[in-house]
Image (spheres, rainbow, N blue to C red):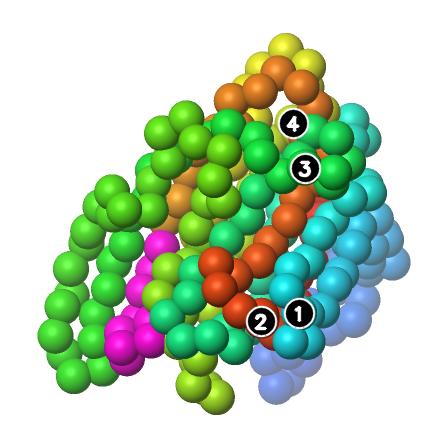
Amino acid sequence: MGTITRLFANNLTTGGVLKADAFNNASLNNVTALNAAIATGNMVLLSSQTASDSASISFTTGIDSTYKEYQFYFIDIHARTDNASFQFNFSTDSGSNYNVTKTSTYFTAYHSEGGVGGVLNYDTAVDLAQSTAYQDLIYGLGSDADQTGSGSMQLFNPASTTYVKHFIARVNNYYYNNYMQDNFIAGYGNTTSAINAVRFQMSSGNFDGTILMYGIK
């Protein structure tokens, strides 16, 4: 290991702030190199779609063998119908059909505004067992003006023609009956065909919100 020849105190201003040239010594990369590394990182935004009273959002391009992992971020998903579920399904034919067989688990931590609850609960009503149905990410989402849900989902190696397709999701939401829900979902699409499209929708009615898709190298 190399020796740092500059005292750390010399890298600080009298106000305790790190100086701009603090990285310009032999022991560390310079600031320009650090910024370049961040700008060309391994998490690449591939698509951003915004729903405005929309029935669904579908990602039908960009899901291929380029990346081994895809991440979807859900930002302020707002249901237009009270007590509806935000859900997804996969496609192996570029979005002609969303009917991949899935097996999953679903558990929730919840707590009400009035202090009731504080419970961790496995939800058998929203897990799947070799089903082609849509998988819930949020159930019971409220439709009040301030009620939304946000979170993320990881999809692993969807282009594989050898293995099943694993997914993991975590979403926090405002339950329609004034509860906070923290949802944990995981499972797999039981297909060796490549998954090349994903659709998000509500179980009933339309929704607002933004969904981002990233590729992870």
Tell me: 67 left or right of 87. Answer: right
* Front position in the image: 191 or 22: 191
Measured along the vertical axis of the image, is residue 103 above or below residue 59?
above
Query: Foreground: 84 or 177?
Result: 84
**First to last magenta residue range:** 174-183
Residue that carries the numbered disc 4 in the rendered image: 157
The mark nearer the N terminus, 1 or 4, is 1
Helix, strand or loop under label 2: strand
The amino acid on which the numbered mark 3 sits, given as a three-letter code, is: Asn
- Which amino acid type is shown beneath numbered disc 2? Phe
Mark 3: secondary structure: loop
The reply to whether callout 2 and callout 4 are in contact (CB within 8 Å) is no
Q: Are marks 1 and 2 in contact (CB under 8 Å)?
A: yes
Q: Which residue is mark 1?
A: 54
Q: Please state which of the two labelled residues, at mark 3 or mark 2, is closer to the viewer.
A: 3
Q: Are marks 3 and 1 in contact (CB under 8 Å)?
A: no
Dot label at residue 207: 2
